Amino acid sequence: MRSFKLLTFLSALASAQNFTESIAPSATAANGTQIPNPTLYATTLAINVEDYWNLRIGPVQEAATTTTVSPTPIPSTELIPPPPLYYAPFPTGQQVFKMPKNESWSFPKDFLWGVAGAAQQIEGAVKAEGRGPSIWDKLPRVPNYVVNNYTSDIADNNYYLYKQDIARIAALGVKVYSFSLSWSRILPFGKGPVNQLGIDHYNDVIDTCIEYGVTPMITLYHWDLPLYLQDTYGGWLSSSIVPDFVEYARIAYTAFGDRVSHWFTVNEPIVFCGFYPLPTQHFPNFTIPNLHQRYWCGHHVLLAHAEAYHLGKQILGANSTIALKHNGGYKIPLTNSSADAEAVQRAWDFNEGWFSDPVFLTGDYPASLKAFVSGFLPEFTEEQKGMINGTADVYAHDAYTAQFYFAPEGGIEACVGDEENPLYPTCANTSYTYAPTSNSWLIGPAADPGSPWLHDATTYLPSFLHYLQRTWPSRLGIFITEFGFAEPFESHKTLLQDILYDPVRSAYYRSYMQGVLAAMSEGVRVVGTLGWSFVDNYEWAQGYSVTFGMQYVNFSDPALPRRFKASFFEYVDAFEVYQEK
């Protein structure tokens, strides 16, 4: 195990360095005299990666397979799609009525279609070859933070099985593999010494993609913040994260930019900023009010992304594509009232607009969000606005679903003035059912109960894509960087063939691709789609209780062969039928 000396390690008591304005500089002794506040006392420790794991995480699980596995040929029988995409030669008699091809639909030859995964969710091998811990190595060890206290210590063991994983997706003709780097695998403490073993690993992942004719795409940050940065200054709560992230981006661009031209800086900041406040018994408390923390995080994300974008253009060149990945869903007014229309606009402002308006329109926040954050966030300077504006070459969106929005009971104005209202500060209520006047029907089939936010609402996808293009136009178009579905109760199934035949997910992929094709035929410029996920994986707070994978993984021994599910063939079929040859 390789370890690195850390020059200085600040204790949790010292980690409030960027927030001293909110901490009393002195304290009152029992006799009434003023003394220096002892909570500001700091210490310096010498610590290496192994020590840090032992102090903050403790023991971790290791997979049985701990060396890189060479790929083996994919059996031809595994590449046979399920009915009705395939007609078995025997027995005869099956009658399948396929939908006729719509001749007005097509994907261009250069359409970037593929699959996606993320380091913390698939790699495992969390301590291997010098990797430092991330916050997502600590959070599963907070009791009941994750279902069944599942960890990602082993996950899919993709760190050692990546060659076979890439060979499998290539066997189905997949064109693109989008993956994230583990920041703490390259920089064990998030800054400081560079772990060459981490660089070497990702070099081989990239080279393996190229060997199989698969285009690699890289996301720099997919939620796995190096734990040391959170411990020492609060991670994304502090402006110190900006230079550290930009330096990490520089290292990655320099190491991999000769073979990778498509980059995403951060994945879904709306979500990962919502992790704050982290559990205070397990992470330092930086005294920023809980409600404000996510917006401090978002403020620093925008600055870090913008600087990383400009640096990337200098290193990678003008032909590179760099963007950040947004997320959310189409927002539909529940009724045609003006109040519900206002609620929808506020929902856009506090979700996609939070990061899209600064990047694509003004360099600053949308109106209703700015009215809220102006009371505690610093204003972006004109220089900062200019730096942020225009820092995405595509509009990258993880576009899964849709939802109804309506004004809260008592009205929006009353909610905006009441910090105790559970809908504050967005002040927009949500529903997955139509209005009572439409019999309160569900918007679409529900996913697994562990993903209550997700429904098959693909009938609204063309309208969603039109809205994105109209509201936040981008230079190169829209890239759907994640979409997928959690098959209901799949993790409870015990028969493999039941798991592999995933009808609700398959229907979702079929109707989703039809929605993309329809939108493109109507003038929406969609340049690519990435299905989530190419394998069952670690689904954050849901652990392994919810599955999004288009391939089955046996988590009791991830080295056992993966198996394609019916949904993977459904996704591929859209391009076999509609992509220009």
Image: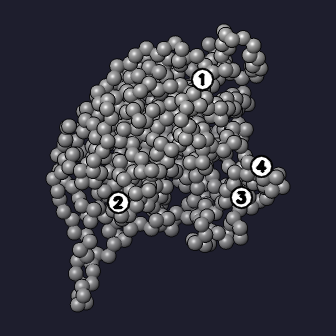
Could one spot residue 545 in this view of the protein? Answer: yes
For label 4, count other residues whose C-alpha is less than 10 Å away and answer few (under 14), some (14-19) or many (20+).
few
Q: Secondary structure at mark 2?
A: loop
Per the rendering, the mark at residue 283 is 2
Circle 1 residue: 569
Give the Cα separation between the discs numbered 4 and 2. Answer: 43 Å
| Residue named by callout 3 | 406
- Label located before the other in sequence (1 or 3): 3
Type of the residue with mark 1: Phe
Q: Position of residue 520 (x, y in %)?
A: 68, 29
Task: Name which residue lies at 31% across and 25% down.
Answer: 68
Viewer-side label of 2, 1: 1
Left or right relative to 293: residue 95? right
* Relative to 373, residue 146 above or below: above
Q: In the picture, which quadrant includes the C terminus? A: top right
For marks 4 and 2 on the same chain, the one whose residue lies earlier in the sequence:
2
Where disc 4 sits, the SS reads: loop
Work out whether residue 558 or residue 70 is closer to the camera in this orientation and state it: 558
User: Of marks 2 and 1, which one's residue comes earlier in the chain?
Assistant: 2
